[in-house]
Amino acid sequence: MVTTVFFTTSFVNTPPGGKAPNLLFTVGVGAGLIGGLYDGYYSYGKLKQHGDFGLGAPDKLDGELVVFQGKIYQTQNTGKTFVVDDKQLTSFAMVNFFQPDKKFTVSSAMTKESLFHFLDSVLTNVNGLYAIHISGQFSYLKTRAFPPVKEHDHTPLASMLSLQHFFEFNNAQGDLIGYRLPSFMDNTNISGYHFHFLNNQKDAGGHMIDVKADNITIEIDQMDSYSIQVPSTSDFEHFDFKKNRAEDIKSVERGNKEGGK
């Protein structure tokens, strides 16, 4: 039988530089990204003023973004990972100033399913907004990145699943940066679990598809409010948000059309 050993430590939230520590700041609308709004409009320099932790999508895709310790990294569809220029743009991102309330150390092997089950057991507010940092040793990780698209190409993201580039890592050390958001935030954000990976060398990453963890530390920051920077672009103004994209969101998150959590 696998035994999980953990301990908790509480922290006191203090606003960094006077900024609100419990606010989730979102650029763009999640359903818009899923539906094809890929053109960037908000600079990374501005984004960093609203958080030092988070994830998102680059301008016209070409990979995935992770915000960690105040720096923003892009993993392109080739796998190349680097710090972005502040002047470049994002089409969708969510960030917060990470101030952990709780900390857990897990010393047993965990699959993606058991990891999410464990997180569910400690994130007891089903309608809570949680930022989650997982660091340590991973025996296996599978990530993905989407290819670039042309300007004003609005092919839905779920229709581009066959174009994903996958990356697999064995015995990797690094960080998972992510969130668990409640169902009432679907469409504006992306509800459920959502993680991006960044290895210790800061030269590989991507959207997490699968994971097997060996020895990890989990830090939790519960937020109590969120705001959305609504795009002022012509494409956004004419986008159809009436379409239900719930299934497309699930497919994009897990990296395939069917199966998986």
Image (tube, rainbow, N blue to C red):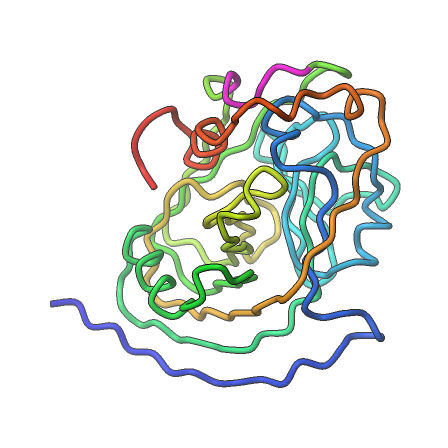
Residue 155 falls inside the magenta stretch: yes
User: Residue 123, percent across and down?
Assistant: 42, 67
User: Residue 90, percent across and down?
Assistant: 76, 37
Residue 106 falls inside the magenta stretch: no
Q: Is residue 99 left or right of residue 87?
A: left
Q: Quadrant of residue 92?
A: top right
Q: Residue furthest front?
A: 242
Residue at the location (43% across, 54% down)? Answer: 172
Residue at the location (46% across, 39% down)? Answer: 143
Please provide the residue range marked out in magenta: 154-160
User: Residue 158, percent across and down?
Assistant: 50, 22
Residue at the location (38% across, 63% down)? Answer: 119
Q: How many marks?
A: 0
Q: Quadrant of residue 100?
A: bottom right
Q: Residue furthest left?
A: 1
Pick the quarter of the image with the C terminus: top left
Q: Is residue 260 left or right of residue 10?
A: left
> Considering depth in this image, is 174 or 228 the residue closer to the camera?
228
Q: Is residue 99 left or right of residue 40?
A: left
User: Residue 30, percent across and down?
Assistant: 62, 37
> Considering depth in this image, is 36 or 70 the residue closer to the camera?
36
In the rendered view, tell whether residue 167 sits above or below residue 105.
above
In the rendered view, tell whether residue 239 sits above or below residue 129.
above
> Considering depth in this image, is 208 or 97 the residue closer to the camera?
97
Pick the quarter of the image with the N terminus: bottom left
Residue at the location (81% across, 34% down)? Answer: 231
